[in-house]
Image (cartoon, rainbow, N blue to C red):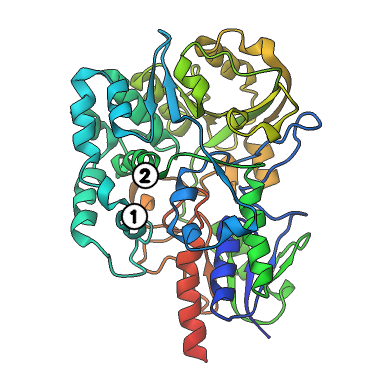
Amino acid sequence: MLDACVVGAGPNGLTAAVELARRGFSVAVFEARDTVGGGSRTEELTLPGFLHDPCSAAHPLGINSPAFRALPLERYGLEWLHADLAMAHPFTDGTAAVLARSVAETAASFGPRDAGAYRRLVAPFLPRWDTLVRDFMSLPLTALPRDPVTLARFGLVGLPPSTWLARRFHDDRARTLFAGLVAHVMAPLSGFATSAIGLVFALAAHARGWPVARGGSQSIADALTAYLKDLGGLVHTDYEVKRLDDLPPARAYVFDTSPTALARIAGFGRYYADYKYGPGVFKVDYALDGPVPWTAEEARAATTVQIGADSAEIGRALRAASREGRAPDRPFMITVQPSVVDPTRAPEGKQVFWAYAHVPSGWTGDLTDVMERQLERFAPGFRDRVLARATAGPPELAARNANYVGGDIGAGAVTGLQVLLRPKLSLSPYTTPHPAVFICSSATPPGPGVHGMSGHNAAKAVWRRLREQR
């Protein structure tokens, strides 16, 4: 009998399996697709030789993850690549605000009236970042805080809506960049704890940057898988689990799936019926005949580029997708250009480019033209560089990855108390009604992102149970 079966070979499922195998437990992973990866895959979506990331592409939380940093993933081929700038946010006048490793460089891009305010915002937390990120990403508490004073101070700043934090700034440059940071998790700017979301992304950039993985995001999953196999773990692909009886006997079952799928497979009925999913996304992967022709020079030097003319435009786009049930006329977009630092991703002289915008859950329209008109505002002539494109709306994204219900790549709405307490209002979010069944997906704290911490935290609950049984 196995100690644990893990269902789903995304970053969280693989991390949970690794953590258990490191402690001497026998583990097998079962993945429905023909390759491991989940939201961390790399595929030729457009033309031969162009390597695209169907979902995650840049990894500020990955390089800062306490779980990943404790594993020898570099030994298994994972290499982080950094551009000159972590992120740029261009404006229609040809200038840009930036998120750089340097706090001073970042603050200077906001203008003289807000430079000091930004430095004061991050100064209390950056020197204590490693401890803070471990405490923050372990909530609800799976271990006692290492620095409860800094965590409490962070809570005072982070729990209010980001619209409150934005009042610290006089000009819209800083407010716009910060609004874009919040929008990475598709949360309305006025939502609970959205200040914390934006601040975590900013601090992550200053601490270790916003890198891409050499060769694509698949190399994160491949490194985890190789390490797991060296530890004696097994990985089965093309193995769809429809009910618990499809799995071999084990003392614990760990699900890197949506709560909806877990309830169906384990027979939990309506146990997760109150869990809310967020807006979907419409994503376009491009094969380009050269770099994106950004007007702002800073955007050419960054791997991640946020697109939104000002904070009001970003706010309207988020409200349209999350509350008004329509696609935005001028969408906020997150774009990633890995070829800036990784020439292996495309043939010589060519580039891969990735962009997505928020749309209502389950939306079935085509946002390609709207997105490209928005891009042309900041990169005139962009369409002339397009060799091929691959589009995916909510139905296509959900078909590729069952965790993306309605196209929600965050596996659950980041709103209300569900920001922190997910998938149930519980201090034990990784356990379920069945004592041998656990959940470790992005539907559990700390939530969306390729960081493995949901799997790491869930593994703690699993190995405690297994030790009790022994």
Q: Position of residue 416 (x, y in %)?
A: 34, 47
Q: Position of residue 296 (x, y in %)?
A: 46, 14
Q: Position of residue 371 (x, y in %)?
A: 57, 19
Label 1 Cα crowd, 10 Å radius (few <14 / some 14-19 / many 20+):
some
What residue sits 34% from the left and 42% below the top? 203
Near-viewer residue (45 or 399): 45
The image quadrant that residue 167 belongs to is top left
What residue sits 62% from the left and 42% below the top? 214
Is residue 448 something that shows in the picture? no
Tell me: 15 left or right of 345: left
Q: Which residue is mark 1?
A: 130
Tell me: 150 left or right of 394: left
Q: Position of residue 232 (x, y in %)?
A: 68, 75
Near-viewer residue (335 or 337): 337
At mark 1, the secondary structure is helix
Q: Which residue is mark 2?
A: 207
Q: Are marks 1 and 2 in contact (CB under 8 Å)?
A: yes
